[in-house]
Amino acid sequence: MVQVLMIEDDLELAQIITDYLASYDIEVTNTDSPYNGLSMLSIKEYKLLILDLTLPEIDGLELIPKIREKSDIPIIISSARDDILDKVMGLERGADDYLPKPYNPRELQARIKAILKRMSPVEKIDETVKKSDFILKEDDIQVYFKGELLNLTLAEFDILKLLIQRNGAVIAREDFIYASDHIEDDSSLKNIDVMVSRIRSKISKIDDSKTYIKSVRGIGYQLIC
């Protein structure tokens, strides 16, 4: 799961967001103490921080520079303060986005996805990449298996492309969602399983002697060549 830290003193709101994002395989850890949040950044690796501004102990705008002294973690400000000066100061001090309250948690999820995709782009290795029996032609949106063109949807192409590019590494299910523009934001991990199953079926029509896409329990998938 994607690990996200939240610093929010409205515990009811924090619970609503935590429960909602969990359905997108995003695990939120919340604290209502800014200084505790700073300490947590040193203890555990988080992919993103959701930060309120009106906090006990220290204002969120004053906290951002302290965060930036120790981490380059992406920051989304989540605040009821909609004054333009707060927005400008927050972004100038190092925040990546500003989401004024109230908002729909669906919008927050979409912004998280966009930021993580921007912060961790999939490297384009070559126009044509060969991985054993697979040939990836990224510009043509094509994958050949043992010399035969696989008839893939755009989402299936993105999944198989990532498997080929990661060169045998285990890829978490949620990484496929963040890496693709053709998989809906609200897709569940079960949808990824279904798409991988379809890819396997298309590969097996050419060679069914072994499973080329291995399931890694509790994590995701790995390309075996």
Image: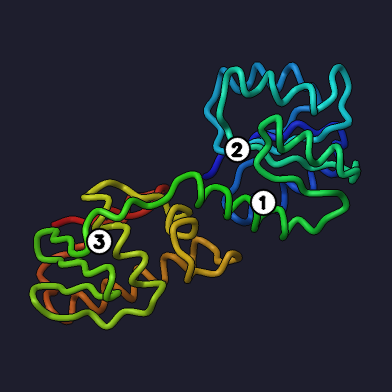
**In terms of depth relative to the viewer, which is nearer, 91 or 152?**
91
Mark 3: few, some, or many residues within 10 Å (few <14, many ≥20)? some
Check disc 1 and give the amino acid type.
Leu
Check disc 2 and give the amino acid type.
Pro
- In the picture, the quarter occupied by the C terminus is bottom left
Q: Could you say which disc has been placed on residue 69 in the image? A: none
Quadrant location of residue 96?
A: top right
Left or right placement of residue 132 versus residue 44 in this view = left
Give the percent coordinates (x, y) of residue 63: 75, 22
Which of the two discs, 2 and 1, labels the residue nearer the N terminus?
1
Circle 2 or circle 1, nearest the eye = 2
Where disc 2 sits, the SS reads loop
**In terms of depth relative to the viewer, which is nearer, 158 or 225?**
158
Quadrant location of residue 67?
A: top right
Left or right placement of residue 222 versus residue 32 in this view = left
Marks 3 and 2 in Cβ contact (< 8 Å): no
Q: How much space separates mark 3 and mark 2, taking CA atoms?
A: 32 Å
Check disc 3 and give the amino acid type.
Ile
Q: Is residue 144 above or below residue 59?
A: below
Residue corresponding to mark 2: 74
Marks 3 and 1 in Cβ contact (< 8 Å): no
Quadrant location of residue 103?
A: bottom right
Residue corresponding to mark 3: 213
Mark 2: few, some, or many residues within 10 Å (few <14, many ≥20)? many
Where disc 3 sits, the SS reads strand
Which of the two discs, 3 and 1, labels the residue nearer the N terminus?
1
Residue corresponding to mark 1: 21
The residue positioned 60% from the left and 55% from the top of the image is 24
Left or right placement of residue 165 versus residue 190 in this view = left
Q: Is residue 49 above or below residue 24?
A: above
Mark 1: few, some, or many residues within 10 Å (few <14, many ≥20)? many
Circle 3 or circle 2, nearest the eye = 2
